[in-house]
Amino acid sequence: MSDSIETLKKRIEELESQAAFQDELFESLNTIVAKQDAEVLALKRQFSLLSQRLKEVGDASLSAQPQDETPPHY
């Protein structure tokens, strides 16, 4: 009987150890995902600003040069 109690104690200790490891892993992964989410949001903002600036530059260059202008080498 004491053999089965010892076996159960060992199994419970192993399960507690695994649960503690999983909790630590979960917290670590949660931190990583939170950092990645912040990085993705920052990259989206940067991409949006860059896209807007490129559109503005493109619009400015189209309006600055007339389409029917004779090239300077003629």
Image (cartoon, helix red, strand yellow):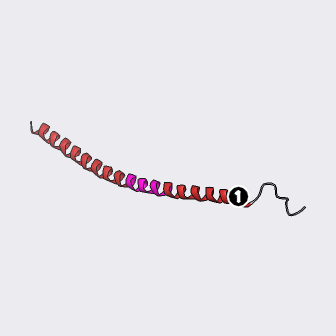
- Where's residue 18, x and y in %? 26, 46
**Residue situated in front as seen by the camera: 61 or 33:** 61
Dot 1 amino acid type: Ser
- Extreme left residue here? 1
The C terminus lies in quadrant = bottom right
- Where's residue 61, x and y in %? 70, 59
Position of 38 compared to 20: left or right?
Answer: right
Q: Residue at x 38, y 54 (%)?
A: 34
Any magenta on residue 40? yes
The N terminus lies in quadrant = top left
Tally the numbered discs.
1
- Where's residue 56, x and y in %? 62, 58
Magenta residues: mostly which secondary structure? helix
Q: Which residue is drawn at 25% across and 50% down?
A: 20
The residue under label 1 is: 63
**Residue situated in front as seen by the camera: 72 or 29:** 72
Residue 67, picture quadrant:
bottom right
- Where's residue 8, x and y in %? 16, 39
Q: What stretch is highlighted in magenta?
A: 32-43
Q: Which residue is drawn at 46% across and 54% down?
A: 40
**Residue situated in front as seen by the camera: 26 or 18:** 26
SS for callout 1: helix
Q: In this view, does 72 lie above or below 2?
A: below
Q: In this view, does 64 lie above or below 6?
A: below
Q: Residue at x 65, y 60 (%)?
A: 57
